[in-house]
Amino acid sequence: MPAAPLFEIDGLHVATADGGVEILRGVDLVVGAGELHALMGPNGSGKSTLASTLLGSPEYEVTSGSIRFKGEDITSWPPEVRGKAGLFLAFQYPQEIPGVSVRNFLTQALQARKGTDVSSIETYMTMVEWMERLAIDSQLMERHLNEKFSGGEKKRNEILQMAVLEPEMAILDETDTGLDIDALRIVATGLKEVRSERPELGVLAITHFQRILTAGLEPDRVHVLVDGRITTSGGPELADQLEREGYERFAS
């Protein structure tokens, strides 16, 4: 019997939890271990709704369909259980947490992820190693999480979290938002570094433009999300076609 896919979205319909407005209208997607998939779509297509739903946001309600991770149905799992199981979300707009240093945040998050007491010294050494590899100033670990961080610092810190927490599936919600070309290359290089260390890591990169893909990341598959549905899937060449022709021709 073949192994279950790492991550699978099957017939996912999602509405807002308050008013019941349907946003996603039957999304199907399968990501295998070690694969990088790009999900592209215009503004208002449902990309961020999908990212939030995959991490269990209470703002949205799954009305039908399922989300499966390593063969288990996680559709009803709360966010903290999904994170502990190995699912990671890099936010489009990372939240500030005043009073909590990056170091303390990652130590507590790693303890929750591993389910056992994790040595603070061990976490510190892992952070130092990854900050060197990701070209991040070591002083960042003592700063309060995302407080007064530049856009590039916030996104690089998300990649640092992904490296230290060792998830099995990462969802990147428009990680390229607000980055100049130099910061974008740094983030893309960091993601490649993490994937080289953890080749079984599955990645779903949700983006509006192909900028992060042209910064050195080549996806295994590209999917087009329009009006709450994936209307087309293809290889890396599909991202180039979208850049040339826009989304209109891919509307359902």
Image (cartoon, rainbow, N blue to C red):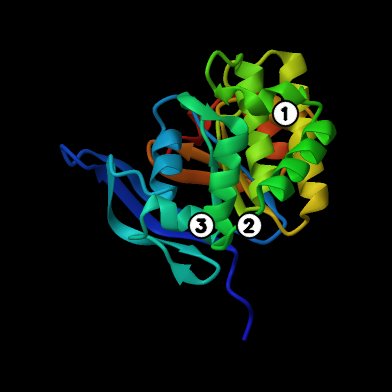
Q: Which one is in front, 238 or 49? A: 49
Would residue 64 be found to the left or right of residue 45 on screen? left
Secondary structure found at label 2: loop
Q: Which residue is drawn at 76% across and 22% down?
A: 137
**Do tag 2 and tag 1 residues touch (Cβ < 8 Å)?**
no
Residue 63, image quadrant: bottom left
The residue carrying mark 3 is: 84
Q: Which residue is drawn at 66% across and 19% down?
A: 152
Which comes sooner in the sequence, label 3 or label 2?
A: 3
The residue carrying mark 1 is: 187
Q: Which one is in front, 31 or 189? A: 189
Tell me which amino acid carries mark 2: Glu
Pick the quarter of the image with the C terminus.
top left
**Do tag 3 and tag 2 residues touch (Cβ < 8 Å)?**
no
Tell me which amino acid carries mark 1: Val
Q: List x then y, in percent, for residue 105.
A: 55, 38
| Residue 244 shows in the view | no
Would residue 72 be found to the left or right of residue 182 on screen? left
The residue carrying mark 2 is: 168
Would residue 125 be found to the left or right of residue 238 on screen? right
Q: Is residue 29 above or below residue 208?
A: below
